[in-house]
Amino acid sequence: MKTPLMHSPIQINQVKLSSRLVMPPMATEKSAGDGQVTEALVAYYDEKTKGGHVGLLITEHSYIDVRGKASPHQVSLADDNAIAGYKKIVDAVHANGSKIMAQINHAGSAAKIVDTGMVPLSASAVMNVNTLFHKRGTLNQPEAMTQKDIDAVIQQFVKAAVRVKKAGADGVEIHAAHGYLLGQFYSPLTNKRTDAYTGATLEGRTLLQRQVVAAVRQAVGDDFLVAMRFGAADYMEGGALPSEVEEAARLLAPGLDLLDISGNMCGYMRTGHTEPGWFAELSRAAKKGSELPVILTGGIKTAAEGEALLADKAADLIGIGRIMLQPGTVAARLMAE
């Protein structure tokens, strides 16, 4: 009997995943107030990867600097004190037979003064247009980043990635989706710059992402996975378009091992769509634009739905998200269906 695609291993750079099932990053708010990993968070990831059915776990977005903190109990990778705590998660996940990556992020204009004590930064002095952020509380007018600010953020991504490697993880995922800072540079709705990072061209809109990838890759070396969660379209008038994804993926690919496709200013949802893999048009375009393996997440609730998308070559790996938040070891049931 032929092995289902969902159960088949895949080699990505130096890392072999036991299956195509990915548990994507989902915020838990289980960290301590200072961003330190708690025993509850370790237990949560331990439970989710029991049995080794999850080929790859990408942990929830962690902030790289306090000014880019997205929520009160977000996990921190902003200083070296975070390494020991994150290593506890890594060790638990590895003991279960799964591979693990940390998602690192700067919230940009999605950060709130009430959480950080600082005025937020963004590509331009433009309010964030992701409606989900507005539902979570009052946003503040951001400051447009100077070149000095940009250079500092690049180094914050680098230092966070190095911490992830020191903690023993298999890789790091750079968050450039869902309307956070790197997504703010990608979206014409929030990037009104006229310098090299201009919102008028794809080259300008992807420049910061490419600089972050290059700097991270140089710091962590070739034997460590580097992925990007790419918010490939805004699905808003005047925003980033699906028709741009193929070329954007080509621009972003150098230095990356993996592209993880999602939405940008629309968040992780796509209005009016409930079908499994509602970002499939974006993941297909990303596969055309680069030779990188692609993860597709969004509306996929069963391994059978993931199997169909893999067979149709919409993606190489399947992220199954919200259903994994149910209590218990959900992965085993999913993969048995």
Image (tube, helix red, strand yellow):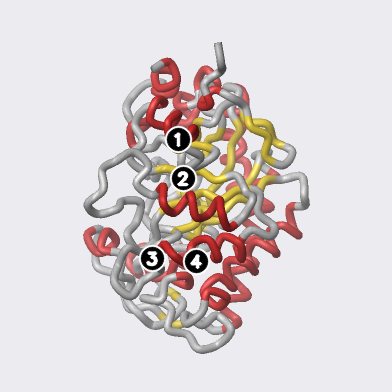
Q: Which mark is residue 111?
A: 3
Give whichever of 102, 235 is nearer the camera. Answer: 235
Given this view, does label 1 or label 2 mark the residue nearer the observer? Answer: 2
The reply to whether dot 1 and dot 3 touch (C-beta < 8 Å) is no
Q: Amino acid at mark 4?
A: Leu
Q: Badge 3: few (under 14), some or many (20 or more) residues near its Cα, within 10 Å?
A: many
* SS at circle 4: helix
Q: Amino acid at mark 1?
A: Leu
Identified at 41% across, 21% down, the residue is 329
Q: Badge 2: few (under 14), some or many (20 or more) residues near its Cα, within 10 Å?
A: many
- 2 or 3: tag closer to the N-terminus: 2
Which quadrant holds residue 89? top right
* SS at circle 2: strand
Separation of marks 1 and 4 at Cα, in angstroms = 26 Å
Q: Amino acid at mark 2?
A: Glu
- 4 or 3: tag closer to the N-terminus: 3
Q: Amino acid at mark 3?
A: Ala
Give whichever of 244, 54 is nearer the camera. Answer: 244
The residue singled out by tag 4 in the image is 182
Separation of marks 1 and 3 at Cα, in angstroms = 22 Å
The residue singled out by tag 1 in the image is 41
Up the image or down, 99 lies above or below 119; here it is above
